[in-house]
Amino acid sequence: MRSAQRGVLALLRRALSRAVRRPSLLPRLAAGPRGLKRLWGACCGVLLAVTPGALPSAAAQTASTAQTNDPRGRLASARDEFERGFHLAYEGRWAAALAAYERSERLHPHPLTTYNIALCEQALRRNTRARRAFLRALTESRRGIPMRGKEADAWMRVGAIERELGRLRLTIEPADAVIRIDGRPLEGDVGGGAQGTLVAGTLPAGPGRPPPAARFEVLLDAGRHEIELSRPGFVSRRVPWSAAAGATGAFTLTLAPAPRSERAQRMFYAGASVAGLGALGLITGTFFGARALVLKGEASKHCNSKSKCDADGVDTYHESQASADIATATFFPGLVLAGAGTGVALAADRFPSLWAGSSPEVRVTAVVGQNGSFLALAHAW
């Protein structure tokens, strides 16, 4: 192609040099409509020869965009990608063939395309992904899209893959910790296995997810893996584990609580103290509230229907009112203090990193006002 470009450029230089030596050549060439067409055609021919593929690539790009928006065009593009994947797989280029089949599936999903994706994954020794793709192809086939006699082979390959997978029976503590293997979250098994079975290696890399229960089984590809377990307030763990083909392993993975900093520890004790004070207020308020109800009932026995009471009834009624005031002054502040103290203590225990920094200050102050006395909780962040 470069030699052709050089030849065209040489011809162009010769023509220009002849035109310079013979100025009458250009007017004769350009004279009339035919001359203009010849001149325009010669210029376009030189441009196409000098920049090969420029216009065809633009046209191909326009055609490709049109095909993507047109259902028939999408089907044709999917067929082209499918054929490209077939030839790449025939050459043993499984990763490139997988990419081509995935592009074909995005354009036009079909069970045969999914089946070929599974073949590529199996050739790449990613058996959990291959198993999922085979099962997905079989599911799509049951919905009415035929696989052209590949169902039996797909089931046979699923069975062969399951015999090569490693199995790990895990027990984790605490049960609400999140887990991932090789930097990928686990996926629920779609193969109809035991309830609570998870599969590793099928999802993209990302944060871990909590398992459905504290005890569960994981299907993995044979080989070396890294299991990561984490939870806020606990020290994360990473454990290497080698899965043998067809073998089953089991162990328990336990997280230790993260050590609290000095400030977090102070916050925990401060919150616990405030919660205890609030609990005392709740107990006191409950006691005096019940006493006020009892005294009110006794006072009503010394009063007639017109609310006129004797001396004992009046004294008992005043005692019930005093008990009610004490209950009000202690129960509701105690409720607030118990809730606030419990929240601070739980936050210091579960999220110790929130308390990094200067030492906290928690103050409980008794305030006496016109409407009564109450307790105030102040915290310096």
Image: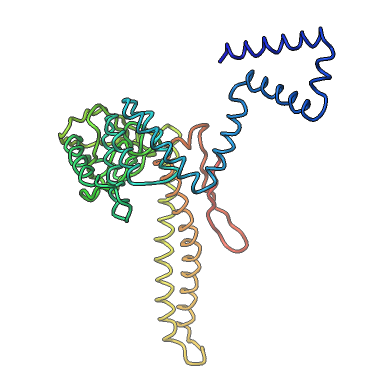
Q: Quadrant of the N terminus?
A: top right
Residue 147 percent coordinates (x, y) = 29, 47
Residue 177 percent coordinates (x, y) = 33, 41
Dividing the picture into quadrants, the one containing residue 24 is top right
Would residue 233 be found to the left or right of residue 118 on screen?
right
Colouring mode (rainbow / by chain / secondary structure / one colour): rainbow
Dividing the picture into quadrants, the one containing residue 266 is top left
Q: Residue at x 51, y 89 (%)?
A: 308
Would residue 309 be found to the left or right of residue 149 on screen?
right
The residue nearer to you, when weighing 368 against 34, is: 34
Q: Residue at x 62, y 62 (%)?
A: 370
Residue 18 percent coordinates (x, y) = 77, 9
374 lies above or below 188: below
314 lies above or below 351: below
Residue 181 percent coordinates (x, y) = 31, 34
Q: Residue at x 68, y 11 (%)?
A: 11
Would residue 366 be found to the left or right of residue 47 on screen?
left
Q: Quadrant of the C terminus?
A: top right
Q: Residue at x 48, y 33 (%)?
A: 356
Dividing the picture into quadrants, the one containing residue 155 is top left
292 lies above or below 193: below
The residue nearer to you, when weighing 166 against 366, is: 166
